[in-house]
Image (spheres, rainbow, N blue to C red):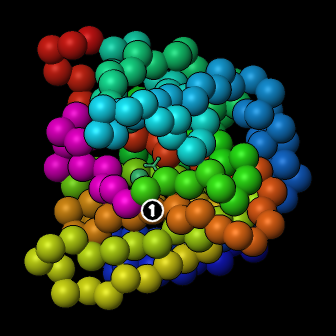
Amino acid sequence: MTERVTVLPGECVLLREFFEADQAENILAALTRDAIWQQHTVKVFNREHFVPRLTAWYGDQGAYYSYSGGTHTPLPWIPVLSDIRATLEDFLNQSFNSVLLNRYRNGSDAMGKHSDDEKELGHDPVIASVSFGGTRRMAFHPRSGNSGKSLSVDLDDGSLLIMQGACQRRWKHSIPRTRRFVTPRINLTFRNILQSDCG
Ligand SMILES: O=C(O)CCC(=O)C(=O)O
Ligand SMILES: [Mn+2]
């Protein structure tokens, strides 16, 4: 049974067990096998570093997205991703034209504090984030002007996290490294990229 947890009122809600365990297991296996994974580099103080995770960008033609210091051209949808997209679009009554995949191979893979507030996502975007595999903790940190306190929430296998409203304007989020043993995890963030003059 799906359990609904308010993480940030009006801004972020978590639905645990949105996908059943056997469905989630099949999705994890299909994505591990079929997605085209890359490890990008970022330049810090003039030195190239690998980002500590694998990524992939899928979407409609023309859904270009800038992250990890580059502009990325979407790969065409594969069945496992279009099925999840259809489920989320139905459930949320919201369309998504793209999805960012992140694969955390172990507890050393992580994502630093950021907000998904790029111009191409538009004002106060709805982002649907689904997780498969090992449980990882997401931390929320208040941005300047937000008197809220940092908090964290466990994103477990089969869960759906919906970020909306002022979430990106008021908070940063991260997936910190952990020393605990964790099995591999794949997270998908479905987004709607506003296609202007580049498509
Ligand atoms: O892995 C996660 O749960 C977070 C991913 C994320 O924040 C992002 O892709 O922007
Ligand atoms: Mn994010």
- Pick the quarter of the image with the C terminus: top left
Percent from the top left, x then y, of residue 155? 62, 67
Percent from the top left, x then y, of residue 112? 43, 56
What residue is shown at x 84% (from left), y 48% (from top)? 25
Residue flagged by tag 1: what amino acid is it? Answer: Ser
What residue is shown at x 49% (from left), y 53% (from top)? 111
Instruction: Count neighbours of disc 1 (C-alpha within 10 A) and say few if under 14, some if 14 to 19, many if 20 or more.
Output: some
Q: In the image, 155: left or right of 128?
A: right
Residue 98 in view here: no
* Residue wearing tag 1: 174
Find numbered disc 1 in the image and state the secondary structure of the residue it sits on: strand
Q: Hey, which quadrant is residue 54 in on the image?
A: top right
Which residue ends up furthest to the right in the rendered image? 22
Q: Which residues are magenta?
A: 113-123
**Against 17, is 61 above or below?**
above
**Against 93, is 84 above or below?**
above
Nearer to me, 34 or 68: 68
Residue 162 in view here: yes
**Disc 1 CB within 8 Å of nearest ligand 1 atom:** yes
What residue is shown at x 47% (from left), y 36% (from top)? 49
Residue 114 falls within the magenta-colored stretch? yes
Q: In the image, 186: left or right of 95?
A: right
Nearer to me, 157 or 109: 109
Residue 20 falls within the magenta-colored stretch? no
What residue is shown at x 39% (from left), y 45% (from top)? 94
Q: How many numbered markers are drawn? A: 1
Nearer to me, 91 or 132: 132
- Pick the quarter of the image with the N terminus: bottom right
Percent from the top left, x then y, of residue 98? 44, 31
